[in-house]
Amino acid sequence: MKVNIVEEILSANDQIAADNRHTFDEKGIFVINLMASPGAGKTSLILRTIEALQSKLRLGVIEGDIASRVDADKVAAAGVPVVQINTGGTCHLDAPMIRQALTDLPLDDMDLLLVENVGNLICPTGFRLGEHAQVMIASIPEGDDKPYKYPAMFTQVDALVVNKTDLLPYLDFDLPAFRQVVMGLNGDVRFFEVSCKTGEGLEEWAEWLVELDEMGKVN
C-alpha cells in the first residue's frame, strides 16, 4: 500500500510538472532548478547571476525555504521579480508549489527563471518541477566526499557548480579527485568552479546560462 501511495504522489506531481513545462515553453522561459545543502551558496549564486545577466536577460526567481523570506528580500532588493515559497517543514519543492507561485510572476516579461530549492541533497531529486535543467551547488567547506554519500543527485544533474573555491588553500578538499568521482557518476555533467565571494569563474557560468536560453528559444 505504501508503495502505491508513493507512486500516486509522484505520478500526480509529474503531471503538474508537465503542465508547468508546457507553460514555460509557451512563454519562452528557460527554467533552472538549483539544489544544494543549506549554506552551499544557492542565494549567493543567484545574486551573482543577477549581477551578470540582468542587462542581458529578463530574470525571475522562486525562493524555496522551510520558513522566512530572508533570501527573497535580497533578490527583490536586486530588482528582480521573486516569489517566496515557505514549505513549513517539507524538505523539497514540488510541481504544485511552483504552479501556484507562477500566478505571482510576470511570465510574459521573463526569459530565465531560477528556482532555489529547499536546502537538501536527498528529497529534491525525486520531484520534478517542470524545469529544463537541474543544477547542483557543492561548496568546498562541505568536503569532497559528497558524491559517495549522495550519488543520486550527482548522477542526475545537468551541471555542478563548485562554490567557495577561494577557500581551497585553507581546507582539505581534493578538487581533481572530486571532479574525477563526479564525472564517473555522470559523464555528461557540466562542471563549474566558482567563488561567489571573489567572482572567479562566474563569467563562464553566466555565459552557459545565456547559451541555454538561446537554445531554448530556437527549440
Image (tube, rainbow, N blue to C red):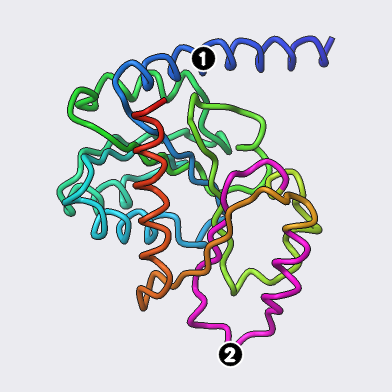
Quarter assignment of residue 153? top right
The one of 117 and 136 positioned closer to us in this rendering: 136
- For the N terminus, the quadrant is top right
Q: Which residue is mark 1?
A: 18
Q: Label 1 vs label 2: CA separation? A: 44 Å
Rendered residue at 67%/75% (across/down): 175
Disc 1, SS: helix
Rendered residue at 38%/33% (across/down): 30
Q: Position of residue 10 (x, y in %)?
A: 66, 17
Q: Position of residue 70 (x, y in %)?
A: 31, 52
Residue 206 counted in the magenta span: no
The one of 157 and 99 positioned closer to us in this rendering: 157
Residue 65 numbered tag: none
Magenta stretch: give its range: 155-182
Quarter assignment of residue 52? bottom left
Q: Position of residue 165 (x, y in %)?
A: 52, 77
